Image (spheres, rainbow, N blue to C red):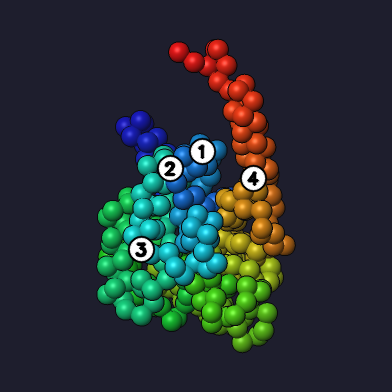
Amino acid sequence: MSVAKEDSVKKVTTRHLVEMKQRGEKVSMLTAYDYSMAKLIDQAGIDVILVGDSASNVMAGNQTTLPITLDQMIYHATSVVKGVNHALVVVDLPFGTYQGNPLEALASAVRVMRETGADCLKLEGGSEIRESIERILCAGIPVMGHLGLTPQSIHKFGTYSVRAREEAESRKLVEDAHLLEEIGCCSLVLEKIPAALAARVASELTIPVIGIGAGGGVDGQVLVMHDMLGINQGFSPKFLRRYANIGDEIVRAVQAYVGDVKSRDFPNETEQY
């Protein structure tokens, strides 16, 4: 019995995130898009891995998250899940697969959960997508909300600047946050909003609130792995802390390899059969 109990808590669940909030433990969350990187991040002890639609940018080279398809998200999520033993795996539903039609939203959600083995889905928006979220939740699929800067709506905003500075937008964000909790979302991401507003939302909700560019008063933090490791070097917002410069290391390593091949130093006698 003790072994079974130990195994049951090895994997992070949505319930564990709520318990972390209750005891004041911060939630750590990073993106991943492939098996090898997900395995490393999971071994490092991350709580949540987000298979983000940011794959559209950092993996496919698109300017926005809009072009990535459901099939592509399923491919990335399936790869990530295979490398994870501990972390909760959350998958973004991509643009156009849930916003306008609750039945399509459910079909998209079922495909992701059935084909990838992921633990939770993330959807951007508040009251506008209430019916889609409720339909997914009724199927027993956990949903993480996402408010503030919602990249799938970039053409509506026209900019990636800080959201909810004005009173009307701030008030709607708070209302939407409460709505998402009331209808059953298990957690919430707040992106690029004033720190004081994010702290207020986190204090008013019982579900964990995870921030990106939303200050330290929330229940956890998320960053794009390519950004925090310095692989994506062309993106440096105020909220980003780089923990490594792996991009520079990769360039140096490849340059050294090219030099060794050209000079006939690689392979040497000990590196051949």
Residue, x 33% and y 34% (percent of image)?
A: 4
Q: Amino acid at mark 3?
A: Leu
Instruction: Place residue 204 in its image quadrant.
Output: bottom right
Q: Upstream in the sequence, badge 4 or badge 3?
A: 3
Helix, strand or loop at mark 2: helix
Give residue 16's position: percent from left, percent from top.
Answer: 46, 50
Q: In the rendered image, is residue 185 in sight?
A: no
Could you tell me how far apart the alpha carbons at marks 1 and 3 are, in whole angstroms?
Answer: 25 Å
SS of the residue under disc 3: helix
Q: Quadrant of residue 144?
A: bottom left
User: Spatial distance from mark 2 to mark 1, Cα to Cα?
Assistant: 9 Å
Q: Earlier in the sequence, mark 2 or mark 3?
A: 2
Q: Please state which of residues 224 and 163 is positioned toward the viewer in this rendering.
A: 224
What residue sits right under mark 3 in the picture? 70
Position of 82 compared to 264: left or right?
A: left
Mark 2: amino acid: Tyr
Figure disc tally: 4
Q: Give the vertical position of 190 relative to 165 (above or below).
A: above
Q: Decide: marks 2, 1 in contact (CB < 8 A)?
A: no
Q: CA distance from mark 4 to mark 1?
A: 17 Å
Q: Would you call the spot at circle 4 few (<14 residues within 10 Å), some (14-19), or many (20 or more)? A: some
The percent coordinates of residue 113 (x first, y second) are 31, 56
Give the residue number, with chain letter if any, for mark 2: 35
Residue 40 is tagged as: 1
- The x, y position of residue 84, in whole percent, is 42, 42
Relative horizontal placement of residue 151, taking residue 82 as reference (left or right): right
Q: Is label 4 or label 3 in front? A: 4
> Local crowd at mark 2 within 10 Å, few (<14), some, or many (≥20)?
some
Residue pointed to by mark 4: 247
